[in-house]
Each structure stands twice: as structure tokens, then as C-alpha cells.
Image (tube, rainbow, N blue to C red):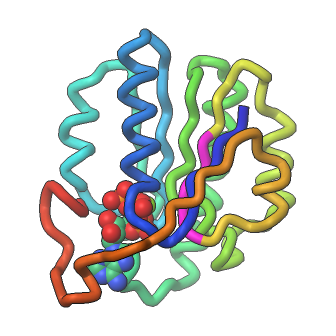
Amino acid sequence: MIQVYTGNGKGKTTAAFGLALRAAGAGLNVYIAQFLKGRDCSEHKALKKIKNIKLEQFGRGCFIRCKYQQIDMKLTRQGLEKVKKVITSRNYHVVILDEINVVLKLKFLSFKDILSLIKCTPENIELVFTGRGAPAQLIKKADLVSQIREVKHYYKRGIKARKGIEF
Ligand code: ATP
Ligand code: MG
């Protein structure tokens, strides 16, 4: 199945991590590729304690307030190649591509790249795509799409990202 968590509201990445937790509890192996991110978020410290969840980052750690460069595209490509290996290894049941929708928006990868990834994914692997602005083609292809709408967000009142809540 292909799941997509998108929209401007808060809760896409944490929803995916919630699914990872549930899957790991059921004995499934989970692989998480975080695109565009490269710093140690608090959730990583927690996930490291769970032996059947593996998380890797393919970014520089300046997500949101970032001036993206060539290196970000290169890291993204490396991430895609790694995800392909993970999928074809068949060692993982749930594969999460965190912020991949943002990668597509930035045109660091094309939808063709995603299609080829989907094509090499066996039926029994759950593929999860997160990030704002999922493209229409991905929404069409997906089996499940959750659009998280921002009704209110404290950052608009100037509240900065808080450890343990945003990272
Ligand atoms: P979460 O990781 O909490 O589940 P998300 O994945 O839905 O959120 P993203 O769009 O990936 O949200 O943004 C990452 C985090 O940064 C979110 O927690 C979000 O609330 C916060 N955020 C988004 N925009 C801003 C902003 N302009 N200033 C400060 N924080 C922001
Ligand atoms: Mg996110």
C-alpha cells in the first residue's frame, strides 16, 4: 500500500513515526529515510532504542529555514538509491520517505523517480510519503492520503520550534 501524509498542518512526520512505532511493536521491520533533514531530532534518540527501526538522514540539517544548494540534491539522490536497495532487499515491511513531497516540490527528484521506486516495491511493503505539497500524480497513485490542514499554529504568534515538540 502507498500512504501519503500531506498538508500544511502539523503532524505529518509524527504520524509516520507513530506508524513506525506501531509496526515495530507488531514485529515488523521499519526503514525511515529522512530527506532534507540532517540534525539529531529527539525522536531519533527514542527510535534508536527500538531494534527493528532503522533511520537514516539524507540532508544537511537546515530544514525549513534553508537555502538549498547542489549538495542537497546530491544527498537526496543518494537517499533515493538507498531506499531502492532497502526495498529490493525485502528486509523491511514499512518504508517511510519523510519530506519526500518537499523534495519533489524542489525538483530534486522527479515523479518519474518515484514511479520507478513504486514499480520495484513488492505488494507487501507499506510505502509512506510525507511532506507538504504532495503532487497530484502521487495523490492519484496512492491508496491512502491524509491531508493535515492547519487551523491554528503557534509559530504565527512567534513561538519558536521547541525541543521535544517540534524537534
Ligand atoms: P511534525 O514533525 O511535528 O509532525 P510536520 O511533519 O507535519 O510536523 P513539517 O512541515 O515537516 O511538519 O514541519 C516541521 C516542523 O516545523 C513542524 O513541527 C511544524 O509545526 C514546524 N514549522 C512549520 N513551519 C514553521 C515555521 N515557519 N516556523 C517554525 N516552525 C515551523
Ligand atoms: Mg515533516
Quarter of the figure with residue 117: top right
Q: Position of residue 72 (x, y in %)?
A: 52, 73
4 to the left or right of 17: right
Residue beneath the point at 24% across and 55% down? 41
106 to the left or right of 96: right
The answer to which of 74 and 153 lies nearer the viewer is 153
Residue beneath the point at 47% across and 67% down? 36
**Residue 15, placed above or below residue 1:** below
Quarter of the image with the C terminus in it: bottom left
Quarter of the figure with residue 161: bottom left
**Residue 121, placed above or below residue 91:** below
Write down which quadrant ligand 1 falls in.
Answer: bottom left
121 to the left or right of 52: right
The answer to which of 130 and 50 lies nearer the viewer is 130
Q: Position of residue 19 (x, y in %)?
A: 45, 33
Number of numbered markers: 0
Quarter of the image with the N terminus in it: top right
Q: Assign the magenta stretch its main secondary structure.
A: strand
54 to the left or right of 51: right
Residue beneath the point at 39% across and 40% down? 17
Q: Position of residue 15 (x, y in %)?
A: 42, 45
**Residue 161, placed above or below residue 45:** below
- Residue 61 seen from this side: no
Residue beneath the point at 23% across and 78% down? 154
Over which residues does the magenta segment extend? Answer: 128-132
